[in-house]
Amino acid sequence: MQSQLLISKGARRYKRFGALFGHSLLVAIASSSVIALLFIFYFIMRDAIPFFRIEGVKEFFTSTHWYPSRNAPEFGALSIFVGSALVTLGASIVAVPLGILAALCLSDILPFSVRQVAKPVIEMLAAIPSVVFGFFALVVFAPLLQTHGGSIIAAGAWIVFAPLGLVVVAVASDVATSRLPGRARAAGRIGAAVLLGSLATLALLALTGFLNRLPVSTGTNALNVSIILGIMALPTIVSVSEDALNAVGRELREGSYALGATRAETLVRVVVPAARSGILAAVILGIMRAIGETMVVWMASGNAARIPSPWFNLLEPVRTLTATIAGDMGEADQVTGSARYHVLFAMAACLLAFAFIMNVVSEYAVRRSRRTKG
Amino acid sequence: MNRFRNALMTTVLAAVLCVIFVPAAGFAQANRIIIDGSTTVGPIGKAFAEYYMSKNPGVNITVSESGSGNGAKSLINGTCDVATMSRFMKDEEFKAAVEKGVSPVATVIAIDGLAIVVHPSSPIQGLTIDKIRDIYTGTITNWKELGGPNVAIVLISRDTNSGTYETFESLVMNKQKISNKAEYVGSSGAIRARVQSTPAAIGYVGLGFVDKTVKALKVNNVYPDNATVTSGAYSIARPLFMFTNGYPKMGSELCNFLNLYLTQKGQQIIEEIGFVPVTKY
């Protein structure tokens, strides 16, 4: 009887071998991305460290003189770091408020049918190749900025700040009047909203009036790139934070309503805090997209290695780390100027270190918010 | 059993890595021309090579761009057949070549002329080379200092990667630094696009890139065109060389390749890349 159930020794070995083969193949595939990462780290560090050995550390981080191609080359990359930071900051100013608000709208405010159409459309933005954005920035947007710079910036300020102001006014008046007794509350809320709303409108009008008169001498500047990068980062931020907001779940929202909270209170005090870690992850992903983008900044940021004056003047051209690496790689052969070759790897190492730090920070923040919640 | 499994996994991993990292083996060919040298002349070499190989399928031409100095070095060491150079050989290089039994022969295959371009609406017609240098060093920052409107000058330069930049730096800048306000763009077409859309801009492009959308300025009172560049009247121009070890044997592949610049197709290629041909059919 028993002998009939036993599989022959050869077949058993064959089967075991097959399982082993499959298993090890899967391990190899799974570890390939880790191996790739390790290789990237290794090769970048291998070529970055010689730069600091040849040229030292101080000039690279403190000088703004970037003349790598001269006979007595200077490798001061401070202005390039500032350029990268400025562009990233500008892109986050454009993308973060817009993205989070759009996600809120999609998840909690707009009807479901609109969301079904709007979300895929926003996500399609992510599918446009960056060189197309770059071409647009250089050929269409830069001349537009030059001729109608002030009014475009003013319109942009409206687009960014008007919805933000609206939400802030609504929430603030809601919160300010929440302590008032029943009947007075509705009237008080309207009064507060009108008061705050007109104040906000006045402030916005003053701001846009000032922006309208700004002269723009060159269209390929930090602002151009910030706006385009902001648009490129939008789909990431919207999509990921909308997922996070959706994941909060109906129970929490209904619980909040059941306790008598208004919709605004529910959104600001329950839904957003609950989705905080996801929103943070979305923002960090969006920022990483902006800082790592190369083609758009190479084509449309002007690439002047100089800190704008004053430093926040987005209307001046800037040079970023990624654009410098891309633009200088071709000539930086190992034979003629070795410091010139290694300096690009030093920049890549800085970018990598920054990405690593951002990832650690976001991981830490996500963990911590999870712990306080649970 | 466990040990067996580990060994197997290691083998598979090693195999995967080998497949990824073992480079494809190259194969040698009899009719081979190796070109090395200037990044400026490199594009001509590449376009010539492409054209020549399409006409003569048996010939294999490799073109590398490692700078004029390295081109000379390779020719002296016998590691290349043609050294493309954007300057003439230095005395020391000649000396080193002769000592190694190499006799460099120069052929001027094209002329590199740079036009200084501004927006068509600009009232400026011409500048001296000193004024151009002052603009690019940042000494002159406003068009009104040159008799134009009161707007800040927007400096546009090619990236330091390009031969065009090298030419500009050596023929105009006279070892002075370009102002850090200068914007760098990645191609001559992009310079033209920036200048035609920016009224306050100034830029420089190879002569082949000048068209009606931008205005080329007179330099030291000479307007840049093929005639003034070939005659040497226009000052921002320099000859481009191909150096060979002796003049190649008539009828050889190398000789035919070298003489491509004399043909109509060769001249078209040179003009397309943005240089000025030496002869005109």
Image (tube, coloured by chain):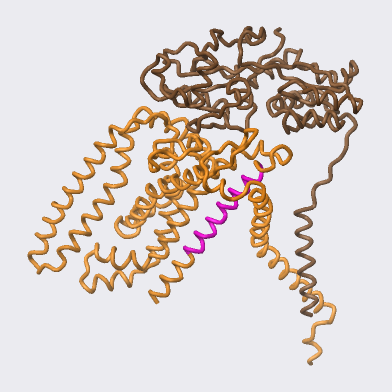
Chain colours: A orange, B brown
Is residue A296 visible in this depiction of the protein? Answer: no
* Front residue (pair A44, B189): A44
Picture layout, residue A87 above or below residue A239: above
Highlighted range, magenta: A341-362
The quarter in which the N terminus of chain A is drawn is bottom right
Left-right relation of A99 to B180: left
Q: Kindly indicate the quadrant of the structure image that contains residue A238.
A: bottom left
Instruction: Kindly report the secondary structure that dominates the magenta region of the rendered protein.
Output: helix
Left-right relation of A274 to A74: left
Left-right relation of A277 to A328: left
Picture layout, residue B245 above or below residue A353: above
- Residue drawn at point x = 81 percent, y = 25 percent: B92
The quarter in which the C terminus of chain A is drawn is bottom left
* Residue that sits furthest to the bottom in the current view: A1
- Residue drawn at point x = 32 percent, y = 55 percent: A105
Q: Kindly indicate the quadrant of the structure image that contains residue B208.
A: top right
Is residue A246 visible in this depiction of the protein? Answer: yes
Q: Is residue A120 magenta?
A: no
* Residue that sits furthest to the left in the current view: A183
Give residue A223's position: percent from left, percent from top.
40, 39
- Residue drawn at point x = 60 percent, y = 17 percent: B207
